[in-house]
């Protein structure tokens, strides 16, 4: 069989399935991402291995690992998929020119920035560009990263830049994380509470995958202190309600608690090593060209940042 014949039998669907398996190191999670059944993903990867006459993935017990040939093909597959996406976007731009419509702006954000910051930004951007359709997706950091890697969004705004090759990031707004408690908590009013004192407090935190939780765990781990997580809640609003009810303390973005602090529903504790000074980041796939709408939104975000320094 000639090289061209083998190439003719490779499809973008096979490459897409293969790259999804590599991202998750799981056929099941790859199937969930692509909205199909696990046997379909296995069949597509099997077809790709037969077409290339290479072993791309190895099974070690329950773990999946890339072979050296699989690693090489994965790099080329990413470039091919990026080129295909660039072609599709170019066609979209041409259709926009003919129809007079602009490409939609697809943005994903982690829970905090997506709930308390991004709606305001999108509202202001929409006033300036009323013809651009806006599509916002809010989830935890892990899901937002998967959304970007799958090409489902143009941009991501998150509290920690995804540590993945092929993603370009740039810092955006500051995001200080503070310790919060109910107004009647015994630590309210105390100055420079030692971090070790918080090991006695029940913590209310987000699920694993949350950027805020990861930042808190890192502070305690570096200090060599245990973190007593008494309750895991899936949304910032639920955590605020639980803290206000006296069920424990938490660490939240200062942006998310402005209203509660102003109305004395929550209080910020003065704790050593806090606030944790973080930033939100704008992230995008390096190999995929920006749509005109995404480029306009990035320019708008930089302008907003300059005005709010």
Image (cartoon, rainbow, N blue to C red):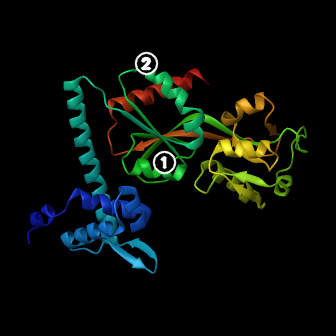
User: Which SS class for mark 2?
Assistant: helix
Label 1: few (<14), some or many (≥20) within 10 Å?
A: many
Q: Residue at x 58, y 55 (%)?
A: 209
Q: Residue furthest bottom?
A: 61
Q: Residue at x 86, y 42 (%)?
A: 192
Q: CA distance from mark 2 to mark 1?
A: 26 Å
Residue 37: % across, % down = 35, 64
Which residue in the structure is indicated by mark 1?
A: 144
First-in-chain label (2 vs 1): 2
Residue 30: % across, % down = 39, 62
User: Which SS class for mark 1?
Assistant: helix
Find residue 280 and report its image quarter: top right
Assign the N terminus to one quadrant of the image.
bottom left
Say if mark 2 contacts mark 1, CB within 8 Å.
Answer: no
- Residue 64, which numbered label? none
Residue 128: % across, % down = 43, 18
Q: Residue furthest top?
A: 128
Q: Residue at x 83, y 53 (%)?
A: 198
- Residue 128, which numbered label? 2
In the shown orientation, is residue 12 left or right of residue 170? Answer: left
In the shown orientation, is residue 113 left or right of residue 18? Answer: right
Assign the C terminus to one quadrant of the image.
top right
Task: Give the answer, above or below, for where 291 lies relative to 59.
Answer: above
Of 147 and 248, nearer the camera is 248
Label 2: few (<14), some or many (≥20) within 10 Å?
A: few
């Amino acid at each position: 069989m000639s090289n061209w014949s083998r190439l003719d039998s490779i499809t973008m669907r096979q490459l897409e399935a293969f790259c999804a398996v590599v991202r998750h190191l799981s056929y099941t999670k790859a199937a969930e991402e692509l909205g199909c059944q696990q046997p379909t993903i296995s069949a597509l990867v099997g077809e790709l291995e037969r077409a290339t006459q290479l072993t791309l993935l190895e099974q070690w017990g329950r773990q999946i690992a890339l072979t050296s040939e699989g690693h090489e093909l994965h790099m080329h597959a990413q470039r091919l998929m990026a080129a295909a996406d660039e072609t599709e976007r170019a066609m979209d731009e041409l259709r926009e020119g003919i129809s007079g419509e602009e490409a939609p702006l697809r943005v994903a954000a982690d829970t905090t920035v997506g709930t308390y910051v991004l709606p305001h930004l999108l509202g202001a951007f929409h006033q300036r560009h009323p013809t651009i359709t806006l599509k916002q997706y809010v989830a935890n950091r892990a899901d937002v990263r998967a959304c970007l890697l799958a090409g489902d969004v143009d941009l991501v705004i998150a509290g920690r830049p995804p540590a993945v090759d092929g993603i370009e990031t740039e810092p955006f707004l500051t995001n200080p994380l503070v310790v919060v408690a109910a107004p009647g908590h015994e630590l309210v009013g105390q100055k420079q509470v030692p971090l070790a004192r918080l090991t006695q407090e029940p913590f209310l935190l987000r699920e694993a995958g949350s950027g805020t939780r990861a930042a808190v765990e890192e502070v305690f781990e570096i200090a060599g202190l245990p973190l007593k997580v008494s309750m895991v809640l899936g949304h910032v609003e639920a955590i605020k309600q639980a803290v206000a009810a006296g069920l424990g303390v938490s660490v939240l973005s200062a942006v998310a608690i402005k209203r509660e602090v102003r109305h004395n529903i929550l209080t910020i504790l003065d704790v050593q090593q806090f606030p944790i000074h973080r930033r939100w980041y704008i992230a995008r796939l390096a190999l995929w060209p920006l749509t005109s709408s995404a480029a306009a939104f990035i320019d708008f975000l930089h302008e907003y940042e300059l005005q709010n320094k």
